[in-house]
Amino acid sequence: MHSCITGQTIRLYGRVKSLAALVLFSSHLQLSDTPPSAAFHQAASQNPNKMTSKLEEARHNALWGLCIADALAMPVHWYYNPEDIKYGYGDWLAGYRAPNQKHPSSILSLSAVDGSGRSGWHAKSRPVVGNVILQGKEKYWTSSNRNTHYHQGMKAGDNTLNALCAVRVADVLKKTDPDGKLTNRELQAAVLEDYVQFLTTPDSHNDTYAESFHRAFFKDWDNLDTPPRKGKEILEFAEKRYAQKMKENPDSQLAVIGSFVMAIPWILHRANQSADDCAKAAVEFVRLTHPVPTLETYVDLYARLLHAVLNGKILRKEAMTVLEHKEMGGRKKLEKVLKFMEKAEMLPRGSEERLNMYQEVSFTLGSACYIQGAMPTMLFTAMEFHEDFEGGVLANANIGGENCHRGAALGALLGAATTHHGVGIPAKFKAELGTSREKLRELTSMKNEGIPKPFQGV
């Protein structure tokens, strides 16, 4: 994920427009550990468990970015016909909005209340929704109303359940392991204990929807004679569950980009360690919630990408490296995405025509939750808006489809990148954020604001 290029090459790259030149440029990216700022990495090397002020700022911006992008997309989550966004809200979204009461393409009433996927896909069992999680919300799942919004009742700026869980993971990691000395397994126990308490406590959040992985996890948890509530016992349950699932046919409903959201705080927590250790922490945690082997490579790739950006690497170039990975489709996929970018350059930036093209790209690459399509769409958007946080998170929302969880992954990348390219996250997005705002302010307060920032370099 690291590459050695000069400042002159970077400036040249910023002016490259043609597909041929972009492909030629990407073919000359060489692996290296040369950092963009020697002072930045030298400070970290002196104490591997201590964050530099610049890296800490990047971590904070990534967490804000996750929540902001999720909240912006929330009212139009799973709008698979993007025109429904403009029709339903009077125009394309330009800020936080509360969800409309009706959702034009909702399948909430078809979703299984007793496990993953849809009703009728497996033998009926005791409903998880209403009995174990989402107490009081089961009426929206079982209603004859086919237009119920997945996030009905939420307010403008509120976060969906996955993002709320991510904020709690970040909180647990920070409070349990402030010096970064505990093992992944020790931290997994603490995180899972909080996760179980949070989701099984009535009225702990205001979302109506829980992804398949939540329902599947708590179905298996609830089937135990005595469902565990202590971290060590929950971790042992999750590990045994993973081992058992590896012997069964994988649940395709869990191979989704939503798996990234709760993994992001692990990447942030281990950002001052090696990319290998950082990716290992993310993958090991995702196994406990999403026991699907095909997902692990994607989590590993994303973790290394975010780790690189947090540590000062150029987002667009690192995203290109990921797209060229064989699991993503190799050189052909990269060339396809670069061709889309070349076409986009022919349209005015910020125009409706260009947004329409982004929507077409998402439809082609994949606008649904499944990782094989959602991740390329997310990477395309990251490359298009690698130095434009506001433009990127708004485009993601207005592209539609699985824009909340795709947006969380995108927002973390774009947020981290703001630290190093100098164009920060607009203050309005922080000030107007809903349910997560106060906790984020607590989590991202700099203890040593007087520490000089390290030299930026080129």
Image (tube, rainbow, N blue to C red):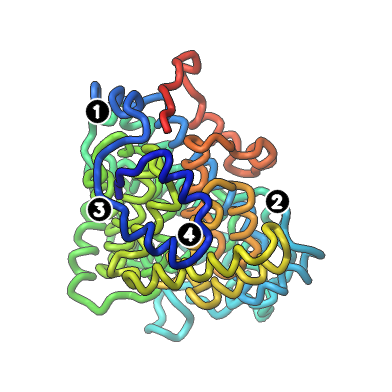
Q: Does residue 375 lie above or below 420 as drawn?
A: below
Classify mark 1: residues with Cα within 10 Å, few (<14), some (14-19) or many (20+): some
Residue at 38% across / 52% down in the picture? 318
The mark nearer the N terminus, 2 or 3, is 2
Per the image, the residue denoted by label 4 is 133
Q: Nearer the viewer, residue 225 or 134?
A: 134
Q: Tell me the CA gap for discs 3 and 1.
A: 21 Å
Is residue 164 something that shows in the picture?
Answer: no
Residue at 28% across / 69% down in the picture? 326
Q: Nearer the viewer, mark 2 or mark 4?
A: 2
Q: In the drawing, what numbered circle is on residue 96? A: 2
Mark 3 and mark 1 in contact? Answer it, CB < 8 Å: no
Classify mark 2: residues with Cα within 10 Å, few (<14), some (14-19) or many (20+): many
Q: Secondary structure at mark 1?
A: loop
Q: Secondary structure at mark 4?
A: loop
Amino acid at circle 1: Pro
Q: Tell me the CA gap for discs 2 and 1.
A: 39 Å
Farthest residue, direction top: 450
Q: Nearer the viewer, mark 2 or mark 1?
A: 1
Indicate the position of residue 152 as horizontal and vertical percent values: 67, 62
Location of residue 27 by image quarter: bottom left
Labels in figure, total: 4
Q: Nearer the viewer, mark 4 or mark 3?
A: 3
Indicate the position of residue 239 as horizontal and vertical percent values: 21, 57
Q: In the drawing, what numbered circle is on residue 284? A: 3
Residue at 26% across / 36% down in the picture? 273
Is 250 on the left or on the right of 151, as rendered?
Answer: left
The mark nearer the N terminus, 4 or 3, is 4
Per the image, the residue denoted by label 1 is 48
Indicate the position of residue 158 as horizontal and vertical percent values: 63, 49
